[in-house]
Amino acid sequence: MTAGADDLILEITKLSKSFGPVRALREVDFQLRRGEIHALAGENGAGKSTLMNIIDGILRPDSGEIRLDGNPVTITSPARAQALGIGFVHQEIALCPDITVAENIFMAATNSSRALLMDFRGLERRSGEILRRLGDIDPVVPVRSLSISQQQLVEIAKALTLDCRVLILDEPTAALTEREAQILFEIMHKLAGQGISIIYISHRMVEIFDNCDRVTVLRDGQFITTMNVSDTTPGEVVSAMVGRVIDSLYPPKLSVGERSDEIILDVHDLTERNRFREVSFELRKGEILGLAGLIGAGRSEIVKGICKLEGEVTGEVSLHGRALRLAHYADSIAEGLVYLSEDRKGDGLFLDMSIAANVSALCVEQIAAAGGGLIDDGRENEQAERLGARLNLRYGHVGQPVSALSGGNQQKVAIAKMLSVSPKVIFLDEPTRGVDVGAKAEIHRILRDLARSGVGIVVISSELPELIGVCDRVLVVREGRIAGEVTDDEMTEDRIMYLASLGEQRPVAS
């Protein structure tokens, strides 16, 4: 960053916002310099989204002032924000699935155009030029045919078409592969070098410290501090976020003496035509097993195949030495194998339903009233309260909708839903995606406690520090096959990425 300390493009002073009795922001100050990448950090519920939604014109503040290039501005809508040169890439993907990638990217420009006919070829050519900077995405395919990570790149491409002076990126790498994330970081630094200022929201400390110039921390709707990244540490930022010291994100792993040879789950020669082949592995008692690999390598597909969620799968699956005969996911649940989706809001939870109803979704028959098909509200509420207490779930009452909870507490509800059926093995796909640092530490502790209690735990994660920190062993998947296994001192980011990319063990230097 070459901008001077007084070269401010965006200055926010004493901004406040309330929703009824809840004060989301309390006289927050924030300053963004020209050409800097400025991280905004805080736990879920800290006020980050409210602040960004005010800057983008989605919300109006109750009080306070926003200055752009030194001039007071009133931002009444996202269209007004765009006219002022403010672009916002939201964490939640908001694309139209039934139209093409190109049409999505230039939707705003098309809507404002006075042309009688749409220039499809022009849209495809211009979108193709932008997409080539981000990844291999065909601009003529419908969005619904893309993976989550590809859809996120389309969202970023939309923002790059705007003449932005301020670009807000909200958890932009949450669904990206390591390679896609690195491409994004290169683009961010190039944009900053061109004088564009970037507000970067992320829970991932490594991304903040590798790419950002300064970091501002919010907590409970209040400004806590702004620090130069070069003058602080991840631990200090996390402590400012949560208001307490977090000793470690990861609980202790199994010691050598605690490791067991007892096999909970045995998978042999699992195959599903073109998606994965001859997959074999064992899950042992007490351990947390990780699945690593690039997006598209087949990690989720393997787990969904085991649970009979999708695909025509062949091979053998045994639980505690007994061969399973599974035809549908309902059979998997009945045997004690459950899957927690990476898409918490799309597949994992019913956001508009109550906490209690979500927790009981897999076990309705267990909380049904005697002699009939009606739900026993008392039993349903008791179950939610009991499992909520076990997971340290923070909520008002079990009748409130899940949508009212923070991301971390929503994930705890999803885990409680799994626990309601007394599972023997839980497969968790991206278990801490979109979850703040404090909640991550809690979820990691929950997983370790479950493993020690005898529940088999398999974790899929695109965050290599998470896999290394929480897992006892990691299997690396490449092109639908197990490329290798890492444990103990071999469990490094370098070794995992080597296996994920090349599929063979690198020679160990003598």
Image: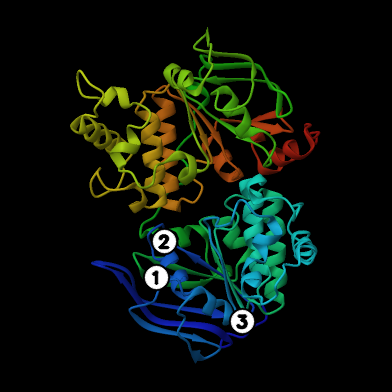
Q: Secondary structure at mark 3?
A: loop
Q: Is residue 110 above or below residue 265?
A: below
Nearer to us of marks 1 and 3 is: 3
Residue occupied by mark 2: 241
Which residue type carries mark 3? Answer: Arg
Nearer to us in this view, 87 or 222: 87
The location of residue 60, given as percent across then percent down, is 39, 76
Q: Do the residues under discs 1 and 2 have CB atoms within 8 angstroms?
A: yes
Q: Is residue 483 visible?
A: no
Q: Quadrant for the N terminus, please.
A: bottom right
Residue 224, label in figure: 1
Looking at marks 1 and 2 on the same chain, the residue that comes earlier in the sequence is marked by: 1
Residue 285, label in figure: none
Nearer to us in this view, 238 or 26: 26
Q: Secondary structure at mark 2?
A: helix
Nearer to us of marks 3 and 2 is: 3
Q: CA distance from mark 3 to mark 2?
A: 25 Å
Residue 86, quarter of picture:
bottom right
The location of residue 489, given as percent across then percent down, is 64, 35
Q: Do the residues under discs 1 and 3 have CB atoms within 8 angstroms?
A: no
Which residue type carries mark 1? Answer: Ile
Which residue type carries mark 2? Answer: Met
Characterize the local packing of mark 1: few (<14), some (14-19) or many (20 or more) Cα atoms within 10 angstroms.
Answer: some
Q: Quadrant for the C terminus, please.
A: top right
Q: Is residue 126 above or below residue 411?
A: below
Residue occupied by mark 3: 34
Q: Quick one: which residue is furthest to the top in this view?
A: 322
